[in-house]
Amino acid sequence: MHRLRVIGRHDMFSGHPAWKRLAAKSAMALLWPIGSLTTAIRCGLEQKAAPSRILDAWLLAVHYNIPPLEYFLYKLWLPERRARLDDYLYWTENTSSLMVLNRAAGWCPGPCPVSDKQLFDTFCTRLGLRAPSLLAVWNSGQQEEGGSVPRRDLWLKPARTKSGIGAERWIWVDGTYRRRDRVLQRSQMEAHIAGHSRTHGKTLVQTVVKANKEHIPYVGETPLCARIVTGRRHDGSVEIIAAAVVWPRPGSEVTQGGDMALIETSSGRICEIHEATQTSASRGLEGKILPDWQYVLAVVRKGHTNLPHYVFLGWDVAFGDDGPLLLETNSGWGSLHLQMMTGRPIADTAFASIAAEYV
């Protein structure tokens, strides 16, 4: 893990010209001490930490590139955790470290199912993996695929954005499409989709997955979504690294920033809900088994087997009323949350041994 951290830091901005890499790294070297100090103070004050602990967080940031946010989240002042600083995957090194591994596996830039949701839909169709129906594709204000706007609930999703940016869920009610305070007639929706594709680029129109009826009393109408992290060894075998279930908080359409819980990967059992109040309805999910869990694990393993140039992937699976559906896969997958909820570094999973095969 130490070697991966070193290579990851060295590889930052590697896709840019030499002068840009030099400028970016110089700026980081100058600004990191200042930025990490302000973050250490802010996080320390939020946790009512002693000044000595805030200073410790800053010194670790300056000398060992440990982000102060993760210092406090992982409680790295504890002796048993401090002794394992290099066993964590930190957000500042996450992207570059994973890219180092992917390059070692033969990754090259270009369109692929991981970065393009339309290609992911084609990928799922080719492999026989169940995914939400793709109804239409728009680009730069023009419709490229599909028919007229259907009379049903719709998702509008930019094909190439992450973290739910630009995603919109529209509900079909009484002959109109509704989203929050907006109401569109069917004729207006087509113009809206065209405008969306001009603003956000290629836009997919997909069906809305309805929640599993057994989950509605706990989390409402939006389906539970599992993030399952897989790792691919040199011999092509795929292992399950970790998994968590997440759902939107009240008033949100997307799972980003939502409530979550770890999933026991062997059984699909939902563990303790992270940060939910004791009176939260979602507490009723604790201990429940996600439906068709072994099937879901087989699906993500099959998917990763057919994407050999990615060492680690995070798969999003919706547990709808018609069974599990594969939403997308991601080259970045939230190691921060997994390490925070388990209280253990990512090196305690198969991540470390798989990464060692490539570096």
Image (cartoon, rainbow, N blue to C red):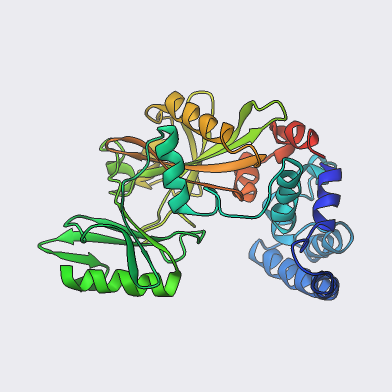
Where residue 36 sits, quadrant-wise, is bottom right
Q: Residue at x 50, y 38 (%)?
A: 272
Give the residue furthest to the right.
Answer: 63
Q: Position of residue 335 (x, y in %)?
A: 64, 47
Q: Position of residue 76 (x, y in %)?
A: 77, 49
Q: Is residue 55 among the parts visible in the rendering?
A: yes
Q: Is residue 211 left or right of residue 288?
A: left
The residue nearer to you, when weighing 357 against 197, is 197
- Vertical side of 338 occupied by 155: above or below: below
The residue nearer to you, when weighing 261 against 210, is 210
- Vertical side of 3 occupied by 203: above or below: below
Where residue 17 sits, quadrant-wise, is bottom right
Q: Position of residue 125 (x, y in %)?
A: 40, 39
Give the residue furthest to the front.
Answer: 144
Where residue 229 sits, quadrant-wise, is top right
Q: Residue at x 61, y 55 (%)?
A: 110
Give the residue furthest to the left.
Answer: 174
Q: Residue at x 80, y 75 (%)?
A: 31
- Vertical side of 67 occupied by 119: above or below: above
The residue nearer to you, when weighing 322 against 286, is 322
Q: Is residue 264 among the parts visible in the rendering?
A: no
Q: Is residue 190 left or right of residue 339?
A: left
Q: Is residue 228 left or right of residue 49?
A: left
